[in-house]
Image (cartoon, helix red, strand yellow):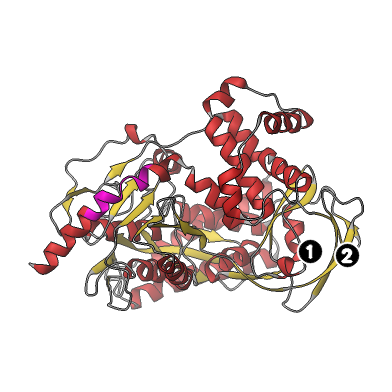
């Protein structure tokens, strides 16, 4: 083993010992045996030495040490993780809520870099890029066969810098060149917000909890209020969470001041903390329904748990994921980082959000996505809301009203994953550029015809995909809605795409029908305040 390898090993494990000693000074009352730690590290170095010396092929030291760190953290819990330096920038962007680039959603479709949608207010929208545009060259180099990571490298860059691209647009015979000046691009938390068909209920789809989430939500609420909103559906389905302070800020918008929204418990001094609502936000007096599913986790569960425990609104959908561990992100000297669990989340009634993970990671993730009918409620883990309603612990948030998890056939999933709907929307919009004068007219008049279905089938054949009449009949509503939604995206933007999709979503429709139950819960809360 080279001197460099020994220096690396000694440095890493020396830092581990110092970190453990530091934790003791921060308040760990357990006896810390330095000799025991050193003997275990000696054992690791012994194995490391044998692998480096005798393994059948040369092995990189960095790969071995990274694997050891990942293995060490995986022994703790499912959410204590190591983040390599190369992945840290993307992870940080998601929490910061922005990046610098040209501002497009994109896919590499049939080896061609294709614009899904320009981000509203971004430089690509400013220069007129449209959904379906194909970026065939970047700085004169062909993009055919490019992978997504290379797209990011070539199109992102410092604010104010310029990138030259060549665009091929469906319906135009010749490609054209565009110079795009990069800018700061927001990563939006509010994916869609609009009024439902009843013209009384607002709908907001919240995709993540990042630095700008509360600010974006406030803006969406104000816009919906101006349109006459009298009740709200807050869709947190498949929202995997994010920043704790943003979860608290979101819950705070709907809950009167002085209420405990969530609390944490940990092993070390300073990790036990209570978080309370304030009187700073005015959205406490209309019916609220929160939608969750198996993919709703962490910050989403904090919001749903607070709304449910404090009788502020109705929670509908499927039992949430059950991620109730608090991570602290610790930067490492080489530019990487680790997220280490330091505490657990509890809802106001005392429910632990975290699901058990004793059976290993495979079962942990598979169990989270069970059919709702297969999930057994732990009748021994009963808690009570402020108004005395029963709620259940055992991991995750169990909704007040369970909805059937809407599943589509493999055929329809293939149409979506292979971007068949996207291609149909692009083709239709380019063939009928002036078919609709407004989105309202489109919503009212667009209907999938037999000719459109034949066009969809032709796209399938082009991609060597077999049409399934049985699957089509089963998923007819979904397929026709996706065709309409993609046409809307290509005429307007992703906001309109989601509006078409969600208004036809069976779970959203069922949720809309439950607004009266949300009113009843709001009255429970009001009576408790008066008493």
Answer above or below: position of 315 versus 30: above
Q: Secondary structure at mark 1?
A: helix
Q: CA distance from mark 1 to mark 2?
A: 9 Å
Q: Residue at x 39, y 39 (%)?
A: 367
Answer above or below: position of 185 versus 41: below
The quarter of the displayed image where residue 57 is located:
top right
Q: Residue at x 16, y 64 (%)?
A: 526
Answer above or below: position of 514 versus 194: above
State the residue lying farthest toward the top. Answer: 470
Q: Secondary structure at mark 2?
A: loop
Q: Is residue 100 left or right of residue 284?
A: right
* Residue denoted by label 1: 154
Asked whether the residues under the numbered discs 1 and 2 touch, taking CB atoms below 8 Å apart as contact, a structural biologist would say yes
- What is the x, y in percent for residue 206? 46, 59
Q: Is residue 470 left or right of residue 109?
A: left
* Residue denoted by label 2: 139
- What is the x, y in percent for residue 150? 77, 57
- What is the x, y in percent for residue 318? 36, 43
The quarter of the displayed image where residue 374 is located:
top left
């Amino acid at each position: 083993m080279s001197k460099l390898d020994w220096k690396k090993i000694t440095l890493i494990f020396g830092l581990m010992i110092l970190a453990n000693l530091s934790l003791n000074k921060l308040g760990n009352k357990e006896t810390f045996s330095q000799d025991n730690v050193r003997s275990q590290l000696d054992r690791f170095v012994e194995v490391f030495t044998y692998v480096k010396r005798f393994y059948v092929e040369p092995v990189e030291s960095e790969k071995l040490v990274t694997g050891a760190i990942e293995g060490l953290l995986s022994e703790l819990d499912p959410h204590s993780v190591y983040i390599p330096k190369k992945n840290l920038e993307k992870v940080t962007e998601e929490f910061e809520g922005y990046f610098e680039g040209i501002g497009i959603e994109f896919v590499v479709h049939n080896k061609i870099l294709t614009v899904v949608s320009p981000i509203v207010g971004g430089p690509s929208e400013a220069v007129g890029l449209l959904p379906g545009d194909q970026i065939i060259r970047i700085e004169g180099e062909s993009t055919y066969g490019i992978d997504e990571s290379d797209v990011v490298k070539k199109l992102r860059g410092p604010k104010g810098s310029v990138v030259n691209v060549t665009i091929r647009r469906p319906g135009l015979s010749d490609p054209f060149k565009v110079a795009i000046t990069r800018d700061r691009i927001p990563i939006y938390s509010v994916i869609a917000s609009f009024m439902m068909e009843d013209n009384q209920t607002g709908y907001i789809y919240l995709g993540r909890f990042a630095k700008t989430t509360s600010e974006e939500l406030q803006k969406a609420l104000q816009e919906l209020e101006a349109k006459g909103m009298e009740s709200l559906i807050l869709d947190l389905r498949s929202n995997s969470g994010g920043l704790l302070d943003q979860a608290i800020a979101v819950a705070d918008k709907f809950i009167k001041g002085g209420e405990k929204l969530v609390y944490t418990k940990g092993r070390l001094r300073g990790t036990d903390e209570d978080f309370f609502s304030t009187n700073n936000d005015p959205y406490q007096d209309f019916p609220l329904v929160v939608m969750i599913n198996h993919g709703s986790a962490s910050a989403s569960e904090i919001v749903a748990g607070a709304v449910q425990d404090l009788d502020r609104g109705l929670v509908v959908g499927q039992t949430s994921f059950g991620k109730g561990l608090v991570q602290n992100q610790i930067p490492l000297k080489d530019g990487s980082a680790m997220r280490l669990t330091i505490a657990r989340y509890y809802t106001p009634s005392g429910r632990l959000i975290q699901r058990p993970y004793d059976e290993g990671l495979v079962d942990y993730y598979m169990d989270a996505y069970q059919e709702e009918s297969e999930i057994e409620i732990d009748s021994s883990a009963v808690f009570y809301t402020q108004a005395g309603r029963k709620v259940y612990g055992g991991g995750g948030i169990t909704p007040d009203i369970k909805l059937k998890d809407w599943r589509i056939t493999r055929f329809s999933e293939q149409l979506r994953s292979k971007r068949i709907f996207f291609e149909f929307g692009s083709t239709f919009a380019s063939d009928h550029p002036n078919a609709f004068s407004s989105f309202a007219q489109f919503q009212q008049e667009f209907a999938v015809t037999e000719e459109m279905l034949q066009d969809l089938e032709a796209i399938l054949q082009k991609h060597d995909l077999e049409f399934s009449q049985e699957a089509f009949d089963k998923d007819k509503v979904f397929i026709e809605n996706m065709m309409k939604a993609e046409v809307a995206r290509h005429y307007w933007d992703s906001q309109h795409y989601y509006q078409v999709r969600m208004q036809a979503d069976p779970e959203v429709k069922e949720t809309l029908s439950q607004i009266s139950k949300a009113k009843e819960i709001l009255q429970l809360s009001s009576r408790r305040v008066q008493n």
